[in-house]
Image (cartoon, rainbow, N blue to C red):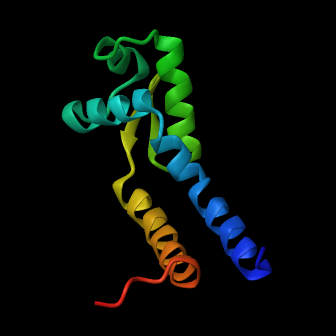
């Protein structure tokens, strides 16, 4: 096996295992993002009212989205309000796309037409 191709494969796997992409691969989190898009910022109870999961499950998904930089939260009295951090999300996609393009050029060049 070519050592360079192995290194490229390992690096591409690392890029694809980013917290951002891992957070976005869970269907329940995608549904949660849809609710946030449709209804705007909300607390965990309000979000759970729009989803089939229990409040505790929604809360765990929100923590994953926070850790991945997809969502942010603010305190409003005793409750936390969650919203999508659109600009942070876009900033995270840019380096992933750039890295993926560079790696694809090394391992999987486009066919010439």
Q: Pick whichever, 3 or 22, lies toward us.
A: 3
Instruction: Please tell me whether residue 12 is drawn above or below residue 74 in the rendered image.
Output: below
In this figure, what is the number of numbered marks? 0
Residue 49 lies left or right of residue 8; in this view the side is: left
Q: Residue at x 51, y 68 (%)?
A: 96
Instruction: Please tell me whether residue 98 is drawn above or below residue 83 in the rendered image.
Output: below
Q: Residue at x 39, y 14 (%)?
A: 45
Q: Residue at x 34, y 36 (%)?
A: 33
Q: Position of residue 78 (x, y in %)?
A: 49, 20
Residue 81 makes an appearance in the image: no
The answer to which image quadrant residue 51 occupies is: top left
Q: Where is residue 110 in the image (x, y as percent from the top left)?
A: 40, 83
Where's the N terminus, which quadrant?
A: bottom right
Q: Position of residue 98 (x, y in %)?
A: 48, 77
Q: Which residue is drawn at 60% across and 63% down?
A: 15
Q: Pick whichever, 99 or 31, lies toward us.
A: 99
Instruction: Please tell me whether residue 87 is drawn above or below residue 67 in the rendered image.
Output: below
Where's the C terminus, which quadrant?
A: bottom left
- In the current view of this chain or complex, which residue is farthest to the bottom? 112
The answer to which image quadrant residue 4 occupies is: bottom right
Residue 110 makes an appearance in the image: yes
The answer to which image quadrant residue 49 occupies is: top left
């Amino acid at each position: 096996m070519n050592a360079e191709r192995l290194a490229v494969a390992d690096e591409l796997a690392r890029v694809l295992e980013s917290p951002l992409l891992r957070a976005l691969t869970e269907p329940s989190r995608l549904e949660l993002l849809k609710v946030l898009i449709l209804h705007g910022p909300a607390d965990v109870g309000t979000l759970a009212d729009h989803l089939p999961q229990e409040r505790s499950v929604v809360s765990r998904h929100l923590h994953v989205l926070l850790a991945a930089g997809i969502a942010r939260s603010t305190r409003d009295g005793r409750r936390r309000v969650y919203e999508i951090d659109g600009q942070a999300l876009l900033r995270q996609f840019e380096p992933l796309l750039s890295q993926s393009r560079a790696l694809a050029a090394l391992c999987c060049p486009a066919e010439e037409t």
